[in-house]
Image (cartoon, rainbow, N blue to C red):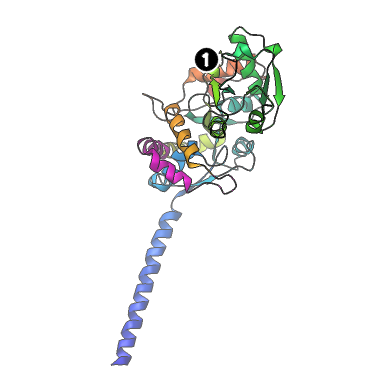
Amino acid sequence: MKKSLLIMLSLLLLLLSACGKSESSKSSGKDAGLQKVSLMLDWYPNAVHSFLYAAQEKGYFKEQGLDVDIQMPADTNDPLKLVAADKIDMALSYQPQVLVARGEDIPVQSFAAIVRHPLNQLMVPADSSVQSPKDLAGKTIGYPSIPLDEAIVSTMVKADGGEAGKIKMVDVGWDLIPAMATKKTDALIGGYINHEKLLLDKEGHPMRTLNPADYGVPDYYELVLVGSEKGLKAKPEVFKKFMAAITKGQKYVSEHPEEGLSVLMKHEDKSSPLEKDVETKSLEILLPLMDAKDKSFGYQDPKTWSKVAQWLKENKVIKETVKPEDSFINF
């Protein structure tokens, strides 16, 4: 009796094991059927990336048959380079940088506008005498030695009736917050209203911002998604599926910001921990700036690309003439 019971139990265990293997095989087979896609962020995970992690966690990528590997760059210059070299399928970058790259014959294209307005704004202390760009005469502006930032400041001052030649630009690298906190500079450019400004405010250095788009600088797309020309032509259906998934991800975050932020916080990089209160405020700033209104999420206006390309050429940020229509694609 005992022997027959043991045999029955053994058979049952074998059957359960076989079922488990069968289910596992089905599951792994299902995952294996997903198309692998690599995406590189522009920086470490933060509020602006919430829609991506929401799409991942909620299964929106899988619904589209995609297995998306979200990576963080070792250097902020890596995303465009790796996309151009077809080492990465897609990446987050910046509209002006895409045009600069095109001017250097780097074959990348933007396929979605994520943040539709400048986040990089001129910052001055809340109690500063600077009320508009022309008041910067005789003042020092800290910046990370980027030609684009020089062009932004020069345009803003000239548009406001000031003399750009009377401003001193000081290279502070990426130590933007310490430069302002220690009063080494009178103003900053290169910092973001949803990051550096929030951190300075929190540390007891309240700031005011001047939007470049209010002073002669084209209202450019701060953050865009890019792919290589080769990749976009070879696999348009993959990019379309990706867009469908992130559109759902953005909708989820817009309707459930707290939950969207909670998903993001699970993916913070240990080397760059997130402060929930800062990211909460950041998302509040970002969501309206990511809204395409009556257009689909990510839509790009050809006029915006033309204006930015012309402005960059006029300010010698790009030396070659770039065809704006070749710099982006809408799906």
- Residue at the top extreme, as displayed: 161
When asked about the image quadrant of residue 142, the answer is top right
Magenta stretch: residue 106 in it?
Answer: no
When asked about the image quadrant of residue 327, the answer is top right
User: Residue 104: x percent and y percent?
Assistant: 66, 26
Q: Find the magenta span and give its range.
A: 244-273
Q: Is residue 263 above or below residue 225?
A: below
Magenta stretch: residue 256 in it?
Answer: yes
User: Residue 232: x percent and y percent?
Assistant: 51, 35
User: Residue 122: x percent and y percent?
Assistant: 58, 22
Secondary structure beneath dot 1 equals helix
When asked about the image quadrant of residue 200, the answer is top right
**Which residue is nearer to you in this view: 1 or 158?**
158
Residue in the image at 46% along x and 21% along y: 301
- Residue at the left extreme, as displayed: 1
Locate the C terminus by quadrant: top left
Locate the N terminus by quadrant: bottom left
Three-letter code, disc 1 = Asp
Left or right side of 150 for 234: left
